[in-house]
Amino acid sequence: MKEVLDFLTELSVHNNREWFAENKTWYQRCYARFNEVCAEYIRQLAKIEPELAILQPKDCIWRIYRDVRFSKNKNPYKEWMGCFPAKGVPGQPKTWGRKSMRGGYYMHIQPGQCMFSGGIWEPSKELLTALRKEVEANYEEVEEIMGTKEWQRYFGQDFDSYWGVLKKVPLGFDPTFKHADWLKHKDYTFSTPLTDDEVCSPDFIDKIIDIARAAKPMNDFLNYTFEEYGEFPDRC
């Protein structure tokens, strides 16, 4: 994976079409390597969550080309590579992987910013409300998951704040709730950093699978919302 990180480092300095065209062969070689890593990642994840076995790397990996039409940042290429194995709607393969709104097992590769992330990010308004209700009603289960040594080893004592938090508890929820701060979240994600050396080590897959195993109970808790409140649309 060192070559992948080296390529992304150079891309961050030369993020333009001319440089990319000149180094297209290098990119293709790095993409092929990342594809191999993702294939093995999915294969190992399927031992933890067998339903993920239907996924292929192409279902989980983002294209490197950015959509700049509505962005102030006009750099044409992403300066990272990401893989998101996640379940979708049964019988609808196109809703799985990177297009899923469910909690999954995200692997982010970017020089100096590599990480693993689980949970549900960018939820719809309806889904976020449902998740808050589930967290409030079953906080003891969340406490139990966060209290395990496996969770503590990687994720600490709280959710991340990928999309930030509200200043106040949202309407319809108890502001005196024991874990009122959990209800202020705009998503329910959790993550742990990975060093570049860890990503390049021979036992990288073993490492990230160990993290994924620690993430599964919380993913299961959050994903249960889809069964209790009904299926929500997946990403386009």
Image: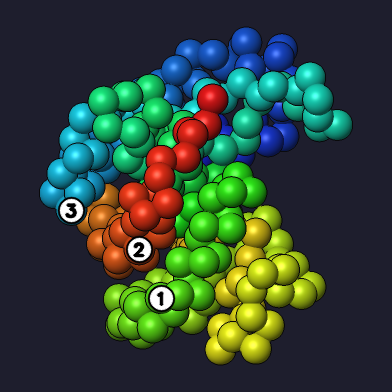
Residue 227 % position (x, y): 34, 50
On the image, the x and y values in percent for residue 75 come to: 76, 27
Whichever of labels 2 and 3 marks the residue nearer the N terminus, that label is 3
Q: Looking at the image, is 83 positioned above or below residue 193? A: above
Question: Which sits in the foreground, 236 or 69?
Answer: 236
Marks 2 and 3 sit apart, C-alpha to C-alpha, by 15 Å
Kindly check if marks 2 and 1 are in contact, taking CB atoms under 8 A apart as contact. Answer: yes
Q: Which amino acid does label 3 sit on?
A: Ile
Q: Is residue 222 above or below residue 2?
A: below
Judged by depth in the image, the label closer to the viewer, 2 or 1, is: 1
Which amino acid is tagged 1? Asn
Q: In which quarter of the image is residue 36?
A: top left
Q: Which amino acid does label 2 sit on?
A: Phe
Q: Nearer the viewer, residue 169 or 70?
A: 169
First along the sequence among labels 3 and 1: 3
| Element marked by disc 2 | helix
- Residue holding disc 1: 138
